[in-house]
Amino acid sequence: MAANTIPRHILGDEESHPHNIGGSKRIAAVFSPFPMGDHEWTGDDQKTPPASVTLAQKLGVMDFFSLNVWRASIGELIGTAVLVFMIDAIVISTYETDIKMPNLVMSVLIAIVITILLIAVFPVSGGHINPIISFSAALVGIISISRAVIYMVAQCVGATLGALALKAVVSSSIENTFSLGGCTLTVIAPGPNGPITVGLETAQAFWLEIFCSFVFLFASIWMAYDHRQAKSLGLVKVLSIVGMVLGLLVFISTTVTAKKGYAGAGMNPARCFGAAVVRGGHLWDGHWIFWVGPFIACVAFYLYTKIIPTQHFHASGYPHDFFSTLKLACGSPQL
């Protein structure tokens, strides 16, 4: 489906967004990190003086009082719940089944599930279902920090519900053996002289989380943030690339380390959080890595978008850019 053929009553009118920060009846394009508007960028847009806005508008404070934003967050909640249930079930089933290279099969299935869910949730909320996307979109300025907070809370609640649903349908032995499919650094395993802790070192897991999250943003979400690539490739292709890149990163992170007890790079803090809340125990060990690592990657990716030549990245139309918001808060002229 080509982006310029998608009906505007579904995607909305992104160019009207800076003047309608409090909430729009056209939901998807306003909330989405995937800008699919018909606006052609010529490079002269940078010369257009920015509209005068207040700090409250930059922060999107009115989003907390927008019914449309909260309705959209329901899509994020349900989408993340389904995501966690499906992915954690895939993790358990692929390792429980006697097949060769279960991590390869798992990665392919995860890529397919993520793609389908992104396509399903996109018209409702923009298809984030991941705090990495919401936080990164807020830094770049596609959505406000207020909307990002609402989305991330909804994602965490949804992830918890998804983990609860999975706990309700699996046996206690499978739950204990596979840690409910959650994000783990280590597990307790039987040893020659009693139980031993096996897994990945904290430093290794931390760097792997940063690298994989940055590659995820650079290799897939980057295409969605750039108007020209998003419009050229089309919605379905962009979302499919996001799913494939995540699947590849799951395969790489589980294959390169080859450590029993390490579940691979999380790249979705909400998914890790949901299983940790429901299962508890050792899932909280090193849980901070699955939040701090991706958020560092988001900041690094944002700095990358500010360093490269402006003609290579169209972000001038995004009203909530972090640097311009910060300068406004400090009383300096906007970028």
Image (spheres, helix red, strand yellow):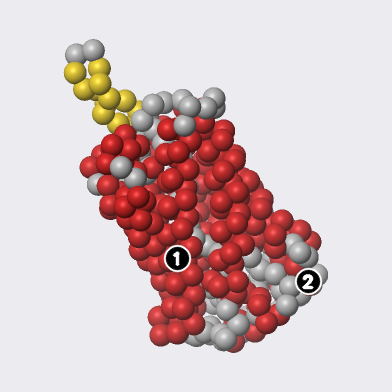
* Mark 1 lies on residue: 78
Q: Residue at x 55, y 39 (%)?
A: 107
User: On the picture, is 271 further left or further right than 102?
Assistant: left
| Dot 2: element | helix
Q: Is residue 180 visible?
A: yes
Amino acid, disc 1? Ile
Viewer-nearest residue: 228 or 232:
232
Q: Nearer the viewer, residue 116 or 277?
A: 116
Alpha carbon separation for disc pair 2 and 1 = 28 Å
Residue 134 percent across, percent down from the top left: 49, 63
Please, what secondary structure does the residue beneath circle 1 have? helix
User: Amino acid under label 2?
Assistant: Asn
Mark nearer the viewer, 2 or 1: 1
| Rendered location of residue 79, percent (x, y) | 48, 63
Q: Which mark is residue 4?
A: 2
> How dense is the environment of label 1, judged by Cα within 10 Å: few (below 14), some, or many (20 and up)?
many
Question: Residue 317 appears at what percent x and percent y?
Answer: 65, 74
